[in-house]
Amino acid sequence: MEILAAIERFILSDVETLTKILFLGNFFFSAVIGIYSLSVTVELDRKRARTLMVAKLFQSFGWMGLCFVLYVPIVVSQNLGQSCLYAGLFLESIVMLDMVGFHARMLSRIQAGIFAAIVIGFNVVISLHPDFRVRIAFGAYSIFLIMLIPGVVFLVRAGHSPLRRLTGSLYVVIFIACLFQAGETLALFSRSGTPYSALLGDFTLLLFVFHLHIGGVAFLLVLKEDTDRKLAELAFRDPLTGLYNRRHFLEHARSAIAQAIRSREEVSILFMDLDFFKGINDRYGHNFGDEVLRDFASVIRMHVRTCDIACRYGGEEFVVFLPNAGRDGALVAAERIRAYLRTAKFPNKPDFSYTASVGIAFRVPGAKAQAVDVLHALIMDSDAALYRAKEGGRDRVVVFEDL
């Protein structure tokens, strides 16, 4: 019992002090995020940081209303203040859903509907019902509803990021605490004369302090984590097509060949080139030429396996490395891509079509072979087969073994 009493004394805090911490903490954290947004180079991440800055500023105004609840009219301290708090939590939830990207637009619309219903409902309740316990219960339920979707989604979609798991877990703990607080408050309200539980209310405020310090910093680090990941992707992605660039392809194909050497697996390469691409640029312009390159990259992604390594090798040349695939597997993939191109349509140029030529090379690497030598030989052989496909009239697949 003494331990429980000690825990209760530790959790029970000066509510006024906690509220001031939440007001000042959110205000200065908003300023920090604003300064951080100035150094962000990725436009999407800068937008997210600025939205989070506004969210924290609204939350600061909301807690400020509670700080001055005894000194200003109720319409300012509670109606306006609580609405600002809801607005801040709503904007923060939108940033979370946007970062997750899992049906973000649909979930954001649901969040907007929840937010609108909460703001209207709270202002109606606070105007019609004078009992503070009903207001506390409604406020706690409201915070539960706002944080429910983003907390669960962010936690489920955290992947391998400990920061995402930490942020999502903190949200889940807060909205569960709010749910219990609301339930207990309504239960106490049904028994007239029973005082409101200060312990649970203070614990919820402490969780918001944790959310401010731990969750806020984690959120900022998650934003930076996403920015760093995108910058890293720029180092190995072709910016036009989104496929791997040549350097990344060579590095990962060598690793895959080393694995094939150990397991004695057959490997193959498709070397592809768009037919008459210079004529497309000359006739339709380079912007449309870029559109054709993007379309061809999407066709490649559609018809290769997840284990295959596809890259834009240079200009209009594309290469696909197929681990554990020989002549037949490579032929099937190449013919699928070539045939699909005939069905490609461009809305702004319905009569336009394009083709590609493909060269194929395959082999089972020897036990003593070097991965870099095997890869070089495959590229040279598939390039020679591609050259023969061009000489033979284009829009065809040629296997190096058949030369």
Image: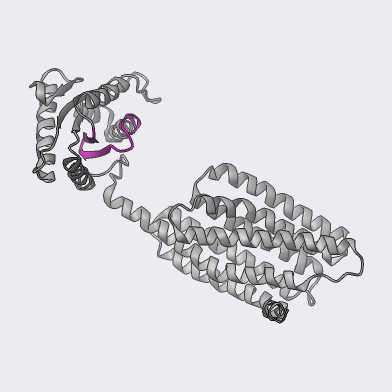
From the viewer's perspective, tell me whether residue 306 is left or right of residue 183: left
Label count reads: 0
Q: Measuring 64% from the left and 49% from the top, which residue is drawn there?
A: 111
Q: Is residue 190 visible?
A: yes
> Is 305 in the magenta?
yes
The quarter of the displayed image where residue 259 is located: top left
The quarter of the displayed image where residue 43 is located: bottom left
Which quadrant holds the N terminus? bottom right
Instruction: Check the image and report above or below for 162 versus 350.
Output: below
Query: Where does the magenta region start and end?
Result: 299-324
| Residue 34 x, y percent position in the rendering | 49, 66
From the viewer's perspective, tell me whether residue 365 is left or right of residue 157: left
Q: Measuring 25% from the left and 39% from the top, which residue is drawn there?
A: 311
> Is 334 in the magenta?
no
| Residue 150 x, y percent position in the rendering | 58, 52
| Residue 360 x, y percent position in the rendering | 16, 28
Instruction: Check the image and report above or below for 248 versus 207.
Output: above
The quarter of the displayed image where residue 221 is located: bottom left
Front one among 100 and 91 = 100
Q: Measuring 9% from the left and 42% from the top, which residue is drawn there?
A: 369
